Image: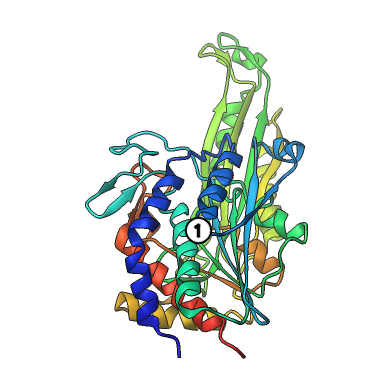
Amino acid sequence: MTDYARLDAWVDAHFDEEVRFLQSLVRVPTDTPPGNNAPHALRTAELLQDFGFDAEAHAVPAQEVQDYGLQSITNLIVRREYGPGLRVALNAHGDVVPPGDGWQHDPYGAEIDNGSLYGRAAAVSKSDFASFTFAVRALEAVARPSHGSVELHFTYDEEFGGLLGPGWLLRQGLTKPDLLIAAGFSYEVVTAHNGCLQMEVTVHGKMAHAAIPASGVDALQGAVKILNALYAQNTLYQQVTSAVPGISHPYLNIGRIEGGTNTNVVPGKVSFKLDRRMIPEENAVEVEADIRRIIQEAAAQSPGIQVEIKRLLLANSMRPLPGNQPLVSAIQKHGEAVFGEPIPAMGTPLYTDVRLYAEAGIPGVIYGAGPRTVLESHAKRNDERVALEDLRRATKVIARTLADLLQPA
């Protein structure tokens, strides 16, 4: 019988050290773009070495990274071998969007204020570099497993879709775990998530002097018709509901638009970028075909307008795989014991690189250190933070869960 109280006590006794570890990680920027993330991986490997953890550094070839639109990626794997049995991987990503404006705390200061640690990636997901690392340390110090193995996967391509993060590790045959726990929040265990299609649409017209607009073709007017058609479709998406708790309906967002040359010139080109979130029940191929149809039909209403449609990202949704139940059950059991409330199993409207493990046939869930909602964490906004008590308790839940999973068959 595992002594969960001793695991908890080890985490408590080493929690100040865990917080310092997280602070060190937050203080090394990983803004993506531009995506120069190899320095953070090297710093992480140095810190892990202090704990006796040897991190394999797997650098993605420079040309492949540059063609992808980033500067450097080095993914890390730490392998802890105990004996025959299950191989459990714990994955967290270090790359993160740039901080943006409006911060009241230094985005790379890792300041502690009123019980929370502030900084870009403090919640998503450098906090789980810490929770996963210290959960494994607690496991080895207290439970001393003799069966199974654990791998820590610290990767650097979640923001661009994961193909050069977990996707690259899997394609290279560097890992093949039996089960996966990926970085998440503390009050729910996520078993499914939305997919995401991102596209760039370029609308071509013909520039002309604003004094003689009839001599040109207004690309902006054409773009407006396309945008109106897409927004009308977005309203219809509200009538489509998912059966997965935590996921509502599909939706579409236009996140960026640019075009034209000057105030007195009929715009000859306008481009915009769209983000289409797909519920798990949808087929990604059909969704993309439908978006292309809507754009082409709307463009046809403007004589002289031509459109180019470029897919930027196609991230499939994550659906529960048979075999994930031991993960779900253990996290729910220990989550309720540690947090004092039920931990529901549900979906999330986010998309993540965890789907790549699922596509490789590896059952997984999303669970880690963080609040009840993305909004509460300020992820991708100013003053991102993680509550230190959530970090402490999530570390205990992961340590207890690993102790259960690595018992002899």
Res 342 seen here: no
Q: Nearer the viewer, residue 299 or 152?
A: 152
Residue name at image x 59 percent, y 81 percent: 146
Q: Nearer the viewer, residue 203 or 132?
A: 132
Please identify the quadrant where the N terminus is shown.
Answer: bottom left
Q: How many marks?
A: 1
Query: Residue 386 location in percent, x, y?
Result: 35, 55
Residue 284's place in the image compared with 306, above or below, is below
Query: Residue 398 location in percent, x, y?
Result: 46, 72
Res 146 seen here: yes
Residue name at image x 66 percent, y 38 percent: 299
Please identify the quadrant where the C terminus is shown.
Answer: bottom right
Dot 1 falls on a residue whose secondary structure is loop
Left/right of residue 13 with respect to residue 249 in the rendered view: left
Residue at the extreme left: 114
Q: Nearer the viewer, residue 353 or 1?
A: 1
Which residue in the protein does label 1 denote? 51
Residue name at image x 46 percent, y 47 percent: 25
Which colouring convention does the figure follow? Answer: rainbow
Report crowding for label 1: few under 14, some 14 to 19, many 20 or more residues within 10 A (C-alpha).
Answer: few
Which picture quadrant has residue 199?
top right
Q: Nearer the viewer, residue 374 or 246?
A: 374
Left/right of residue 29 with respect to residue 204 in the rendered view: left
Left/right of residue 17 with respect to residue 306 in the rendered view: left
Residue name at image x 67 percent, y 36 percent: 69
Q: Amino acid at mark 1?
A: Phe
Query: Residue 302 location in percent, x, y?
Result: 65, 33
Residue 227's place in the image compared with 391, above or below, is above
Query: Residue 188 location in percent, x, y?
Result: 42, 71
